[in-house]
Image (cartoon, rainbow, N blue to C red):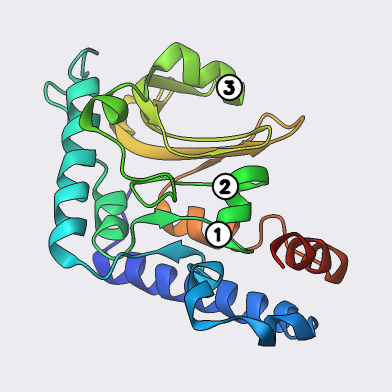
Amino acid sequence: MPQPTEAEVLAALESYGAYINDENYRNFQIISKIEAIEPGDQHILAGLDGGSANPDTEWRNTQREEYKAGIMEGLSTLECPTGQWEFPPDLDIVMNHIDSLEGGGIRWLRQMDSFIFWLGWGDLQGPRTQSYHAGQIKTGTEIAKWYEIEDEFDIAGGFKMGSGTKCWSHAFYSRPKNDESQGWFWRYGGGAYASCGEVFENMVEVLDWYKNFGGLGERDIREMINGVF
C-alpha cells in the first residue's frame, strides 16, 4: 500500500484547516454576540481551523518529542512483527504543524462534549507526560474489537489518539488478512455512538473524513455561544 507523500499530507491538512475555518466563521456570523469578544477572550476563538498550535516553538518541540517517546515506550511492550517499531510517518508530518486535531466548533467546548480525533499535547488541561502517552497503547485484539475488523486485518497493536462523548480513535499497525504481500502499515480508525467505526488507510483519508464530521447547525452554534457568554 503506497504511503502518502509529505506534500500530499500537508495539502490535506491545509484543505482540512481551511474548510473548518470557513465553516466556523460562517456559523459564528449568525451570532451577533461573537462581536462582543474582548481581547482577553481570545482563547474562545482558539483553534477555529480545527487544530491548535502553540506559538512557542521550543515548547512545541519538547512536547512533540515527549509524545513520540511515550508512544514508542508503550509500543515496546508489544511484539513488533517487522522487528522494530516505527512511529506513524504521516502522523509525524501532521505533528510538525499542529499540536492536536480537533474538528469544528469552539475548542474548549469540543473537549467537554464532542469528538477530538487526536488529542496530542494541545488540550486545555495542560500537556501530558511521557508516561501518560505510553499508557495509551492498545493491543491488536483490543483495537480489532473496537472496529469489528477481526476478520479483515492482522493487528500488531496501536494507540488511542483522541476522545469524545461515545467517540473513539486509534492508530494501529496492521496488514490485511491472508495477504502478506501488502506488508505492515499504520492505519487509523474513528467511530462514534452505535457504529463500529471506520478504518482509514492514512492521515489524508482521516483529514478528508474528519473535516465533515459532526457539522454544526445554527441551533448548535447558538447553544454553544450562550454557554460561553
- Residue 20 in percent (x, y) is at 58, 72
Cα separation, mark 3 vs mark 2, equals: 21 Å
Asked if marks 2 and 1 touch (Cβ < 8 Å), the reply is: yes
Cα separation, mark 2 vs mark 1, equals: 7 Å
The answer to which image quadrant residue 161 occupies is: top left
- Residue 144 in percent (x, y) is at 51, 19
Q: Residues within 10 Å of mark 2 (few under 14, many from 20)?
A: some
Looking at the image, which residue is at 25% across and 33% down?
129
79 to the left or right of 174: left
Quadrant in which the N terminus appears: top left
Looking at the image, which residue is at 71% across and 79% down?
28
Query: Mark 3 or mark 1: which is in front?
Result: 1
As drawn, 104 above or below 40 = above
As drawn, 218 above or below 58 = below
Residue picked out by circle 2: 111
Specify the amino acid type for callout 1.
Answer: Arg
Q: How many marks?
A: 3
Specify the amino acid type for callout 2.
Answer: Gln
Residue picked out by circle 3: 146
Cα separation, mark 3 vs mark 1, equals: 26 Å
Looking at the image, which residue is at 46% across and 12% down?
141
Residue picked out by circle 1: 107
The answer to which image quadrant residue 229 occupies is: bottom right
* Precedes in sequence: disc 3 or disc 1: 1
As drawn, 180 above or below 204 = above
Helix, strand or loop at label 1? It is helix
* Precedes in sequence: disc 3 or disc 2: 2
